[in-house]
Image (tube, rainbow, N blue to C red):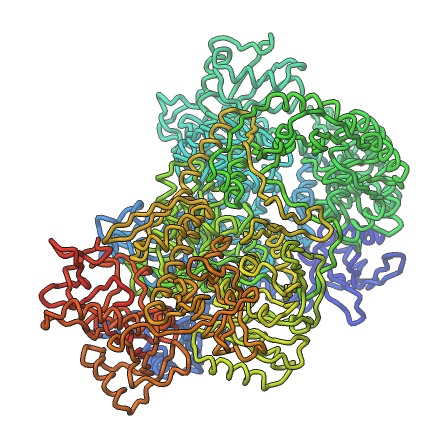
Amino acid sequence: MTSQDENVVIITGIPFNLSLARLKLVLYSYDVTPLSMRVEREQNDDDSTSSKSVIACMSSASDVLILLKRGALNCTVAGKERSIKVGLFTEESGVKEKNDNEKTLEESSKADSESDSEQEKNSQEGNHSELLRCVHCLRLTDEYMNGTKLKATFSRFGQIDQVLVSMERKFAVVKFQNDNDAYNALKTGVTIDVGKNTRILSLSLTLDLPLKDYNNIEKTVRSQQSSIFCTRIPTHSFNYDAINKTFIDFGPIIRIELHQSQRQPYALVDFKNPQSARKVMSCSDIFTPFGTVVVDWNNRETNDIRKMILNERRQKVKPSGAVTNRNYRGKNDRPSTSNSQHRTGRRNNRSKPTSRASSTASEPPMQANMQGLRRDNRGRPMSPPPGNSSEDQSHIRKQIYCRNIPEAFYNRNILMTHFARCGQVEKLYLSTSESKFAIVTFCEQSVAETVVKRGLSLPGAEKPLVIRWSNNAYTKQSSPSKSASAYGNDREPFHLQSVHNSDRTIIVSRLGAKMRTEKLQNYFLNKRRSGGGKILSMQQLPDGIFIVFEDPSVQKSVLQREKHEVDRKELKVFSKTEPKQLEDRFIIMGIAENPDMTILEMFLENCDKYQNTPNSYEKIGRSQLLVIYDFRTCGNVERIRIQVDGKTLESQKLLTRPIFQTDCLKVVDLKEETSNNFIELFFSNVQRSGGKDVTFVDRQVAGSQAFVFFADCNVVDRIVARSLLGKLEVDGQKVQVSHCYNYLQIVSQLNNPPPYVPPTQPSSPSQATKEIPNLMTINLGQNFRIITTSKLFEELKTKFKVKFLVLESERSVTLEGDENEVELGADLIVTLSSEIVSVVFGATMNELKRDFVRFCLEHPSRAENFREKCQAAFNANLIIASVEQGHTKEVLLLFHSSGGAGAQQIETVVNSLIYLRRFSCEMKHVKQAGKKWSEVVFGLFQQGILVISKQGTTNLLSLSDPTSAQEKLRKCLKEFTTVKKEIVRTSELERVLFTIKYFNSSTCKLQRCGSDLQIEGTQHDLEFAKPAVLKFVENLKIQTMNVKEAHLQKILQSSVGVDFLKKSQNKHKIVILKCTTDGKKIPVDQKKKVSTKKKAPPTPSQQKAEKPHLVVYEGKLKTNKNVSVKVIEGNIVTFPCDAIVNTSNEDIKLGQSGGISARILKNGGSSIQDEMNKLLRTIGGVLFQGDAVVTGSGNLPCKKLIHTCGPSWKTQPTANSTKYLKSCVVMCLKRAEKSTFTSIAIPLISCDAVSGGDATVCSQLIMDTISEYFAETQASTLNQVNLVPTLKTMEQLTDTVRKFTNQTVFSCYGSIPPKLPRSVRHIPSKFEIGAHKLSVEILVGDITGQKCDVMITSTKNFEGAIINAIAQKVDISFKKELSDSLLRMRNPNVKIATTDAYSLPCKHLLHLNIAAKINEDVVTVKEALLRANFFGAKSIAIPAFGGSRLTGKQCAELTAESIKNFLEVISQPSIGKIYVVLFNTSFVDDYKSAFANFTIAASSASTSSMSVDGGQTSSSTNNKPSPETIEKLIFCGRESAHNHLAIQELVVYKTNLVTSKRIENDLLMNLGETEKLLKLVEVHHDVEIQLNVNKYVGQAVITGLRADVDAAYEVVFSTLHQLDKELTNMKFVQWKYCDICGNDVAFPLKSNYLLETNFQIYQDIGEKNQNGEMFLNSTSLKVEKKSVETIELLLALKDNQLAALQTVDFSNMILKSSGITLPIFRELVGSPRDAISLPREWDDMNGSDVKQVPLQPLSVEYTQTLSMFNACGLPGGSTIYKISRLQNSTLYKQFHVQRSKVERKLRGSPNIKVIRRLFHGTSEDSVNSILTNGFDRSHAGNGAYGRGVYFATKSSYSHDYAIPAANGHRYMFLVDVVTGEYWQGRRDTTAIPIKAGSNEAYDCVVDIMAAPNIFVVFKDSSAYALYLLEYS
């Protein structure tokens, strides 16, 4: 007789796409019945056809014989005949699988039970295979990280094959030859010597792997480990708060465990993320308020993770249920065995054939064969061993397998926290493979059983976790009489109880269907939006999202907000109370549906040692019972619950769970028409119902009952208690209320009815004898349609002789007929249902088409049409699939797992059925169409066409071509898109401009039409906009301000004043207009008219070229001379330096406020923002005002970016903004210095429209902070601070920087000028100066190609690109001639040189040395024009003077001013044309603007003006044009207060611009020469000059606007300097002429100097004029622009004789004028005694005034001079580069006169030294000025002993003032100083002190009267520089 265990066959060669359901159908066709089947293995054949093997357990031995006789079975797959083989399942065919299963189960059982090293030893004592012969060693010292040493240490245990040492991970592996040796080493233990102590190594057995794999395992361990060990904690700080504060900055902490050890206490800290733990371990020291603690990895966690990884490598674990089914997808797709058990459970009350008794009375045999059980000696399977002890299976009963874990929860610590709430967890393993799962071992078996049976839901997760036993051996132990669904719909999944206090929790309700958990989480994390903060957990509850905050104050902040809104959806937020466990009741689960209450009561009494009887019972489900005791007599019932849990009653195993307070109230007997809103309002009313804070109302059964949820659990108790006193009435209907403890169970029953409907049970024995039809109903749920429409279902109908009743409304199939046939058919349908895969539809489709599918399924008629088309397409592609609507309104795709087509292929088929058409349309037009548009769209909806309009596009989706529908919509929109214009009449321009600027209209466009207002929009828009505009215009307020003062006039006409008015109108939101005397109204922000002519596209070079960075100003800090401060014009983002400062906001988001941050994001890339986001999390989520952080620079040229948050001047007090701004600057400098940077670029922080800072205030604060910082940090690594303002704030910042620095460089673009273009191009700009018959024409190109008489070039020290270009173009000898010309003039300060023209298209070449100083360069250019006129040139060509170093505006002003000064002297020049040749077009507009306002102040009464060709302005000789005079200002705003504030600010601004400067000079006492000059300056510069002169001091105070005062100051100063030269010249040379009467008459002062200067020029270039004549005006000195004193500069004779004299003939020494010739002659002044002879050691001056002669190093003069420096303290070790003798004949003569004067005064005092030889140290920049002009005290500051020039007796003292140049060289002068009589100096001394009781003055002042070290002189001629020392 064949036993049942032998009824197993193996079927091979099965095609992969043949499902188990079809295989069963094949077996049925051969009259055999399989009880269970499972797929054994899958393989790929060589011919690429996939096949699989199936093991089948047959119902009887006869079925096995039938199959074995056939040997092969035929089946049809995809229209082809296939043959499959059948054989008996023997040990040979399944031995491999058996061994693998046995081995896997055995190893899993052991590996999972290891909790610590002791358990590991015990578990491995009985079984250590040959693979575990390797020992893993930790805690090794550096000494033992050596293979040889370790081998010697472990060799005492046995022979060693190999020792692997990992220096990277600090571990070693010792591989023994015998596994017993390895085990002995582990059992015995190994110690090593560490100094005087010993250390026990941490050992464990491991697999035999290469070193690379060991390293990877350790790397994986560290990546998962999130727990650390902490020790050396003082006793007083050994608490949770102290340790939490220490480690909370590294990341969120889940748990802290404190352990009191005998040696010293220690703590275990578990972080939420492994990254936080790694961050802690990366720190070298952890500093705390109580000292430095020691941290290390938690070794226990390390070992657990390592063991799990090794077990996974050994086992390749695949946890599963009783039957492995790779297509198992969810609750609807149960494995076939489970379904078998369902069926068996439903049939066990019916009579059954004997042949099937064994299969119904016990576990299905297939299940036994799948477990890898024991076999006898003949290879036959045996029954499970009956005597499995609890010790062998204890760990299996505690271990569960978990999958479907959301990505957000796939973290060891997070899962450990959630499972620990269910019960104590022994260990947790987290898989690192692609199939993510977890294995959890609980300490108690009951906890594991409860979790497996009840399930577990994670907060916020869409689906519950899939949980099974981790080993099949325990599944086998479960009772076969109890089906797997014993607790199917009656069980409730775990919904974790809160472990937090209610002061940190909230509940959020009224969430929309589309509300995403991630969006809600980010909202409540955002403090600004919600008041929220850090969140500990979020959990999905039936009534909303339950949120637990970390800080209790956050909950208060959230609740205090009046409104919470996300996606325009208002949320309701309540404080959620913590539910308390009820002590008088608990729930019993698994109880019979109709239990015997007497037996139950006695059972419960027996479980209580006090024999208490329950008060009442309440059934809350089919198998759940609520038991309630009297707390007063029984007390806490927890003891009873524990005793009941796990016991058996009436052959049913009972489980229990405690009851917590519920927040759900069950309300029954409601009216059907009562709405949910009414119920919510009623139960929120404390007075009516006693309720409060309703969060959710659910009406599962319409009209009968409702479930009401509350935020407070106590409210439910209060309402129930109130109902006991008297019934509640809701909407006039008396209702009953009660606690609801099983809401989820009720919802589950309503949504998922049981899959089987049991047949009617016989009520009596008599009825049982009647014939009962065999019925079986299968509820298919969402699989109903795909199964009933499949071809397989049709085959079933024809195959089985049963009736199939298909009920679509119930989604079920009922089978009626023969019992066996019904059972087999139902089994096949259930098997087919289990193979249906359900996925969310639309993963590969766009969002629009997914919405269309949802749109089709929502309506029955559309759904039917859609399914028909889909089914036709599926059938055509041989696909079994269906598209269904899910419970949560999501679309599901159902398809057969073995159908051959995947989800992507099926979605492609559906995608091809849907038409999508789109066209562009503005959403505002759609809104305008309004009702008509809605009607058209609704009509299309009814036709099955979906219309979606968003983002300017309308999309049409349909199952047919929607072209006609598209035309309907276009026609509808056309009526609302026609634009019209309408005029609003108004007589005031200011009202028009204000309305255009500030009237908000989103539908209409406003623009100016003359003095009226034009509105443009559709007719619909105009109907609403026009009345609103008229009302807006009428309500505007207008105020005027008269402009009378000259200062205010000038301010308003200047660009600075206009900028101020623009800022004022933007600040106060007003409009300001300037009203001129002729009635014109000019807006202050009116832009110049730009030509509408299209410009040529830029060349590639122009596109790529970026504007260079302009150094507007550079200077050294006065507080720290090592630090240079530059003002830069240009883009700060591209500025080359070490660090760039970015003004950011608090959340450091780039690009939000535009400006610098937007340019950084554009140029630097998104990587900067990514780094900032990471940095933001480390600083608490906010960058506070005044702080700064450092990030990388991305693609920018700098090394790092420093982000700082500046103050907001608009929203906080000025004092706060001031301190925050200073803090920003200091923090930026500190961050840069910490990174050892040398340069930094800083913008004008918080001076923009967003922050509202004033440029003047901010620049003052920034410079003040920088100056203070570097004064305190003298040795800073930073040596260059670059300030990069905007163009609007450039002037204010530059003025401020001047106050804090000593200027070194001014306005230099760069050292390399641009290349010259090849050809000259004409610009249509020609200016005529009618009165002078002179025209100016602007050209662009190469000046060397312009044809003219005289060509003038601009150079720097006669070098540069233009000189090189000319040399390349003509001849190399050109440079030699230029050099010879310079040598011949013998003047180092020469400004003009003349050379031949060579092959250039001109007659003469003049080369100018431009110093980039406007006032000096104007004189130089004017001299060049006079020389060109002297040559008789008719046309000249000039460049942009200083173009490589000056701005376009400065170059243009320099050129125009020079031409004016030239024409003021020469009214009728020979020059008729001036060609201004520019190297590119960038300066053209500046030159046009400069010559457009060109005016000349001529010597005659007539004036000249210029006109542009083609313009309306003509030359005039009678009326002098003047700028338009502003009569008044008009202010227009919505409020009068705004206008008044703007007027007040303008008055204050004007007052602040007025300033004064003082000039002190002895020449001012010469009233005859200076008084007239000062009056002319007053008139010309609109300033007031007050002259204070007495016999001791000459002073002048200049008062006016800042710019005018500066200009007037420069004019007066330069003129006084010129006067000094003229007076000195008069002392030595006197020119005379012989009048008609023969008398010698001396020329006046200026004429005398003019003749001497011309005579010097004649000696240099006079021979080039053939006539030998020279115009005396050719060297007339410019006083200042627009000067009118040119009469004084003309040559005048005594008493104005021959005032019309024009020229002098130096060759014949005669004057020529109007036919009159007079002889002239030159006399040296002074007696022979006073004659001044130059020193004999001087070299020949060769006609030059200045000469610098280097001394030969070995000469006597060199040696003597150097010894003087050394003797007086020159620092030892100094390197001497050069000593030069200084020869300046003019300064030497002035010094000689002063010395003689003092010598005569002190002739009677022989003991007083008249001359002393002293030292003077200076910077490189001042050397040339001293060489040429001597020591100038006007540039000196107020020193400690007065405002004069300082000299020292010691060279060591002067060394400190010799500032090193860029190359490190220093400069010091040896000077002869007239000291004479001296007096004690003081800081306030500004002039030479007068002797007491005398009118005589001292000669100088000193520091110490007794032994002076410092001498200060106040006369420039009192000192003469003898030698210059250059050293380092």
Above-or-below relation of 596 to 7: above
Q: Quadrant of the N terminus?
A: bottom right
> Count the marks: how many?
0
Q: Quadrant of the C terminus?
A: bottom left
**134, 1796: nearer the viewer:** 1796
Q: Position of residue 1802 (x, y in %)?
A: 14, 68
Name the residue rendered at 26%, 87% in the picture: 1757
**Quadrant of the rendered image containing residue 1522:** top right
Residue positioned most to the bottom: 1754
Q: Is residue 497 visible?
A: no
Q: Is residue 1431 left or right of residue 809?
A: left
Q: Is residue 893 left or right of residue 682?
A: right
Q: Position of residue 1332 (x, y in %)?
A: 63, 57
Name the residue rendered at 77%, 48% in the picture: 895
**1187, 1062: nearer the viewer:** 1062
**185, 1280: nearer the viewer:** 1280
Q: Position of residue 945 (x, y in %)?
A: 84, 35
Q: Position of residue 1408 (x, y in %)?
A: 53, 71
Name the residue rendered at 51%, 15% in the picture: 685
**919, 1359: nearer the viewer:** 1359
Q: Is residue 953 visible?
A: yes
Above-or-below relation of 1248 to 1669: above
Q: Is residue 301 left or right of residue 1005?
A: left
Above-or-below relation of 338 to 985: below
Residue positioned most to the front: 1637
